[in-house]
Image: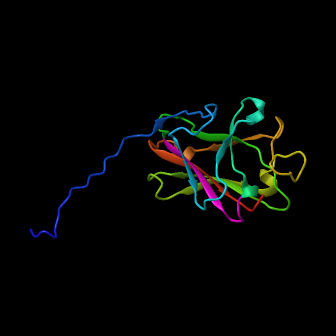
Amino acid sequence: TTNDEATKSFYVYSSGGGVAAPFTEDFESGGFSSDWDVQNLNSNASWDISSSVGGYGNSGYCVFMDNAASNNRDIDELIMADYDLSSLSAPAFSFDVAYSKYRKNYDSLSVLYSLDCGNTWSQIWKDGGQTLSTSTAGDSVKPFVPDVTEWKTVKIPLWSLKSQPKVKFKFKSVSAGG
C-alpha cells in the first residue's frame, strides 16, 4: 500500500434488548437520568424539570415545556431509552399532562415510537389546542402552573408493539407560542 491508504475495521454490536418494562419515571430526582435525551432543535426554550408542581399534587416535580418562550413552529423532543415490551401481555404507554393555551396559540404534543434506534419514527398519539387543554380558567397567563385538578392521564395501548424487545419512545412538542 501507499502512504495515502489505510484499512480500518468498523463493527457495530447490538446491546440486546431494552430496559425491562414496566417502567415508571417520576422525576423526583430533580433532573433527567441518562435514560432521557433532550433534543432542542432550535436553541430556544426546551424541555426542563420543574420543582414547583407535580402531577395531581402527588409529587413535587414534573417535566415541562415552556412554549410561550418558544418561536412559532419550534420543535423540541424528549427521547426515552429503549424498552423491552416482549414480556408484557397488554403493553401500554401512559403519562399525566397539564396544558393551557396562551392567547389564541395552540401548541401540540405527540408521542412517537421507533423500532430502529430512532432512525425512523411512527406517531401513536397527538393532541393540541383546546382538546389538550386541562385548564379550568381557559387561556392562561404565563407561566401556566396547574393545580391538582388540572391534570389528565393519557393511556395509549401498544398492542402492535407487544412482542418488541427494543422500542424507543419520544415526546414531541410543536410550539405555536402558547
Q: How many marks?
A: 0
Quadrant assignment for the N terminus: bottom left
Is residue 95 covered in magenta?
A: no
Image side of residue 9 versus residue 164, left or right: left
Q: Is residue 33 above or below residue 65?
A: above
Q: Position of residue 175 (x, y in %)?
A: 71, 60
Dividing the picture into quadrants, the one containing residue 145 is top right
* Residue at the far right in the pictured view: 137
* Residue at the far front in the pictured view: 3
Is residue 77 covered in magenta?
A: yes
The residue drawn where x is 57% and y is 39% is 91
- Nearer-the-camera pick, 4 or 149: 4
What secondary structure characterizes most of the magenta part? Answer: strand
Q: Position of residue 131 (x, y in %)?
A: 80, 53
The residue drawn where x is 50% and y is 43% is 81
Dividing the picture into quadrants, the one containing residue 32 is top right
Image side of residue 3 versus residue 42, left or right: left
* Residue at the far left in the pictured view: 1
- Nearer-the-camera pick, 65 or 84: 65
Quadrant assignment for the C terminus: bottom right
Q: Position of residue 133 (x, y in %)?
A: 81, 50
Q: Position of residue 52 (x, y in %)?
A: 75, 36
Image side of residue 44 versus residue 100, left or right: left
Image side of residue 30 versus residue 80, left or right: right
Applied colour scheme: rainbow
The residue drawn where x is 10% and y is 70% is 2
- Nearer-the-camera pick, 108 or 3: 3
Dividing the picture into quadrants, the one containing residue 26 is top right
What is the span of residues highlighted in magenta in the rendered image?
70-82
The residue drawn where x is 69% and y is 38% is 62
